[in-house]
Amino acid sequence: MHPEPQHPEPQHPEPQHSEPQHLEPHEHGPDEVPHTHPDPGVDPHAPLHSGPRALRVGIGGPVGSGKTALVAALCRALGEQLRLAVVTNDIYTTEDADFLLRNGVLPAERIRAVETGCCPHTAIRDDISANLDAVEDLESSLGPLDLVLVESGGDNLTATFSKGLIDRQIFVIDVSGGDKVPRKGGPGVTTADLLVINKTDLAPLVNADLSVMERDAKARRHELPTVFLSLAEDRAAAPVADWIRGLVAAREHGREL
Amino acid sequence: MSLATLLLLADGRLPSGGHAHSAGLEAQVSAGRVRSVADLDGFLRGKLATSALVSAAFAAAACAAPAAFAGLDAGLDARTPSPALRKASRAQGRALLRAGRAMWPVAAIGREPHQPVALGALASAAGLSPHEAAVAAAHGTITGSASAAVRLLGLDPYAVHALLARLAPECDRIAELAAARSGDPVDELPAAGAPLLDIGAEHHATWEVRLFAS
Amino acid sequence: MKAEARVVAESDGLGGTRLAVLRGQSPLLLRQTGPRVAGGVTVHLVGGAAGPLRGDELRLDIEVGPGAWLELLSVAAQLALPGRPAPASRLTINATVAAGGTLRWIPEPLIAAAGCDHLAITRVAVAAGGALLWRDDLVCGRHGEDPGDFVADTLIRYDGSTLHRHELAVGPRAAGWNGAAVLGDARALGTVVTAGPATLTAGSATPNAAVMPLAGPGLLATAVDADIRAVRAVLDPFCAAHPTAKAPVPA
Ligand SMILES: Nc1nc2c(ncn2[C@@H]2O[C@H](COP(=O)(O)OP(=O)(O)OP(=O)(O)O)[C@@H](O)[C@H]2O)c(=O)[nH]1
Ligand SMILES: [Mg+2]
């Protein structure tokens, strides 16, 4: 009978359900094997560890905007305090995972690379199975974790993460494409839990007006936060690291995310 | 049985990890063996006669008797000499199981079964017949490669779907053949192999740059 | 034509091998061919007539006892031909290898000529601690011709479990056999299955070949090419370098 005792799988992320869901026994016809039906939306597998599972934060955004640089900065800032692991989604290669390894921000066993078959947005939104398997493998090999960062493959302004995969998402754009990007909007810019506008050090070189970007971001995002960053200068991504610390703390105190 | 349930199981949009796999096509595209719709035709006909027949028979057998999963899994191991293909099949089996468990009460069949075994167990849990499991398996074997061909080669999607429509009767025939043999002992189940798929998968797994996981 | 052949190799008790049985019928004639390797015995399939032809029923039984070492080779390629209208020709090989025994099967290629209809059934059971190297080369059609129908149906067991189960079909009845999933433009195929503790992982991997660790204790080396010589260039060194090539040294 499911769930399988020998291979427990981590709970499917469903932040909106805080109460454990029970599988109700029900009537069966004479020719049926008695069984329970899983509640739709709840993974019918025992959680891997007791206690809350890791907070999962997705990091998306266009190609080259600084997602991997942000992951590296967060590993530097949080790696000592939190039990941390990273899943990368490269389109063709394991470039991002290799970068993190080369830079020694995280040991190899804490990084998994997922291959996305031509469609990076599919792997984080429509068919998240490979990413969930990667998170599950990290948790089963490393034990309980506090934080898993999932970096998406560089994609376009419409790519967002499924809530089945992550709890919160950060969208990273940069100033080098000009100050029009926040105005163009798209689900990434408008709905991400945190918008990071990176490479502010380059703004003068590309004639990007940061105040225009701030105004447009505010118009698109209303109350949702936006931070300006230069990862070239702030190698620990202080405002983003603080934002994540806040989420982890809230989770520890049992507050709903 | 429910036709709508069968369509659900065979739908390419089922979130079961298939989108990341070209089912052997990428390796043959890179080797220059598949460049056109005609080449794809030959590739898919070969797949139907070999891996689709095997997958369909094992899916049907697993649907008829999910509890026999361990023997079927070992039977697929023995029919899959390429470690890269064994890995791809198990990764897809695990992903399919994850999707299936959200939909139906699927029996315990291990954590990472071969894809056809998972498909059969899902079909069984969904109340489908072994023959329907075989149809879903044969159909999935060719549609995955066909959609990868559209993405990799930029082939005309209408021409590719016209090809799939031409292959549909052959797909049905393979599924029927597979279902008819699905009660045989595991050693006697279909074992048709495809040397280029094996060789291609092994080389593909070593590439530094590739679009698909297999 | 109906023919049967049988070879039984056993340990001579001195670290060498002797043949307890060696008999055959045309076209399955067997000859011991001198102590090429100390400690082991080499037997050649010498063949007696062209064939197999449709309607032929051929059977070869091979038994390798504990501690024995047997290598089976053939002097010439088999040429499967159409012959008269008749059911498919069939060659059935049954082989067993006991613990501590070694069997190497390295025949010349089978050529599936146009119009042939041939089935090769191979059943090998290797006991735990036995070693096997099983090679089959196939050429699809004589020069410039399309092949007839040929099916290879292979089952290799090790220590009671199925290690390798494989069928290959070429010819007009085998849909897609010359498509890019099965053989493509290649007309020559060679496979080597090894089973047992003696393994060799290094293998030449040209773009048209791969050496694959099986799920159980064994390997499959596969090579395809337009020309059988390219297949041999990959598989001959593989067979020569495989640990089973060393026969035991007699006391
Ligand atoms: N000048 C400047 N360069 C930056 C900054 N952040 C990142 N970069 C550089 O931008 C390039 C791309 O950064 P990545 O972190 O690889 O970007 P990414 O979003 O992960 O890229 P993909 O994964 O390929 O989509 C690298 O060369 C970084 O060094 C920044 O704040 N300022
Ligand atoms: Mg990156």
Image (cartoon, grey):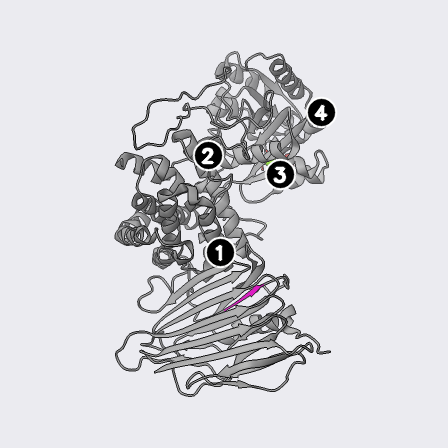
The residue that appears at 55% across and 30% down in the rendered structure is A177
Image x and y of residue C123, in percent: 46, 67
The amino acid at mark 3 is Asp
Disc 4 target residue: A77
Q: Quadrant of residue C194?
A: bottom right
> What secondary structure is marked by label 1?
helix
Q: Nearer the viewer, residue C221 or B155?
A: C221
Disc 2 target residue: B98
Image x and y of residue C45, in percent: 49, 82
Image x and y of residue C140, in percent: 40, 73
The amino acid at mark 4 is Ala
Q: Which mark is residue C229?
A: none
Q: In the rendered view of the protein, which quadrant contains the C terminus of chain A?
A: top right
Residues drawn in magenta = C191-195
Disc 3 target residue: A96
Image x and y of residue B163, in percent: 30, 52
> What secondary structure is marked by label 2?
helix
The amino acid at mark 2 is Arg
Is residue C156 visible in the rendered structure shown here? Answer: yes
Q: Which mark is residue B78?
A: 1
